[in-house]
Amino acid sequence: MMAGDPRLLLQSAPFLRRGITTPRLMTEVIIGMGPVILAAVYFFGISAIFVMLATTAGAAGAEWLLGPARPRGRTLKDGSAILTGIVLALCLPPGFPLWMAFLGGAAGICLGKLAFGGLGQNMFNPALVGRAFLQAAFPGAITTWSAQGDIGGFFTVRASNFAAPFMQATPDAVATATPLGLMKFEHQTTPLTDLLLGNTAGSLGETCAIVILLCGVVMAVRRAFDWRIPAAILLSVTVFSTVVWAFNTEKFPAPWAMLTSGGLLFGAVYMATDPVTSPVTPRGAWAFGAGIGVIVVLIRLWGGLPEGVMYAILLMNAATPLIERVTQPRPFGRGAIEHE
Amino acid sequence: MTPEKMYDEFTKGIWKENPVFVQVLGMCPTLAVTNSAVNAVAMGAATAFVLIGSCFLVSALRKYIPKQVRITTYIVIIATFVTIADMVLEALVPAVHKELGAFIALIVVNCIILGRQEAFAGRNPPLPAVLDAAGMSVGFFIALMCLGSTREILGSGSIFGVPLFGPSYEPWVIMVLPPGGFLVLGGILLLFNWVKQRKLARRAGASA
């Protein structure tokens, strides 16, 4: 915009604008994530802060070192690397060794974002690429869930966090299973109140369903993301898992347990809604979310892993260009005459 | 043929026209069998034997091979050497041979080998053809070793089966799996192009 007060403003479309920029959107999302971060710190103590710092340092360091130079670190200012780091930390287990967390943040930015040309060019959600890398590289460490009450107090640090670089974590904490692991391998159900309040083992940010839901609603109202995507995910998971559950209530988990356990809510609110890797068309958003929901239920019920939100979102990220092409709206006035 | 020219024919395959890092040929063995340094050495040696042997034979017979059936003839010659390499490896190092599996037989369709026959050995006398093949073999061997040792060090914490970091090393499982091959190759290509660009920029700066 030019300085001063132009009498007649001549410009091309778009004429309607929201005064929103990339750094503002990123800040909005980080603030919207605040309660989830606080919940993570509340439930898992100071370890949560260390893991978040490690992933963010890895992500920001990679962005600084390998991102566009001249001036170095220019792209750090939009906050997207920091957001990637925090999101990645929130889907890691609390006792995760910090050197692995650092590596995951760096891998997410390098392989998930910079390799494609930086912010806006990436095909996959960088935080999830980082997590997928960690899952493939360190399958043992990423599925070692320490229970919430296994440490003395808030400031007691889990020893496995401070494993020396390239070395294994000392298995001191009593590892437990997540609600999804219990459901899949031991056929136990976790009480719904525990799932809602976050009183379970799991990744840092995913345990407390109520906080995530509230944050999601607030962010949707503030239009920080497209509300259709999480709505479609939750809807399709509800429908699909209810149908399956109705067939055999003994064998399959109940739909409310499906909705509130694991990373489903966190993924639906904070990861699937990444504006770069999800479709822009409204119909596309519905299709995208529905696809994620179906894949999540398929992996959870019939796959080898207890949790499938990460792969579901990554797979639908890959399908996003196709969805956008199929659901492209008809330009106004086009197509009417051709039918005559 | 002057010694300088011979030297050039030999060294071009190592750096300037490296079959993996510059021509990006032979990706199948490069990605598939480099999950340990031993496998990389075995594959590099087998490929070198086939490449040098077939280049010599093709070059010696180049005046007798009809142009219309040259590809077929090259393949028959290459396959002969591959069969020899396959049997020798099976007799000498059965464990490695088992590990490499079908990839020994697949040397027949390695683009590097057929590419050298078509581009060089089929139109040059035996001595430069062998030198060219030897240079390419060394380049390919170096590339395989770079990938194989990086992947073994990160993925198993050892080199040639000798543990480097003691028992508490946390292996990066992804590095010995197929994605690790792509990641390491991508990283090395990135490094290679970065070095090359810097070299070009410095040369441009010096001449300006």
Image: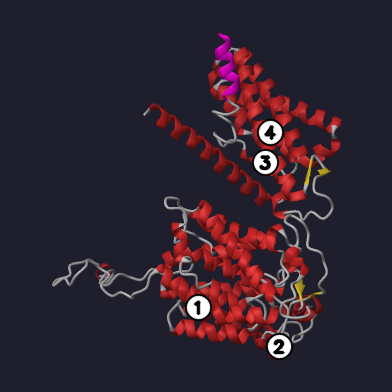
* Residue B107, label in figure: 4
Which residue lies under the disc numbered 3?
Answer: B147
Q: Is residue B8 magenta?
A: yes
The part of the chain drawn in magenta is B1-12
Label located before the other in sequence (4 or 3): 4
Q: CA distance from mark 1 to mark 3?
A: 43 Å
Which image quadrant is residue A138 in?
bottom right
Residue pictured at 75% horizontal, 58% vertical? A164
Identify the image's colour scheme: rainbow, by chain, secondary structure or one colour.
secondary structure
* SS at circle 1: helix
Which residue lies under the disc numbered 1?
Answer: A31
Amino acid on which the number 2 mark rests in the picture? Asp
Mark nearest the camera among 2 and 1 is 1
Amino acid on which the number 4 mark rests in the picture? Ile
Q: Chain of mark 3?
A: B
Which residue lies under the disc numbered 2?
Answer: A194
Q: Quadrant of the C terminus of chain B?
A: top left
* SS at circle 2: helix
Amino acid on which the number 3 mark rests in the picture? Leu
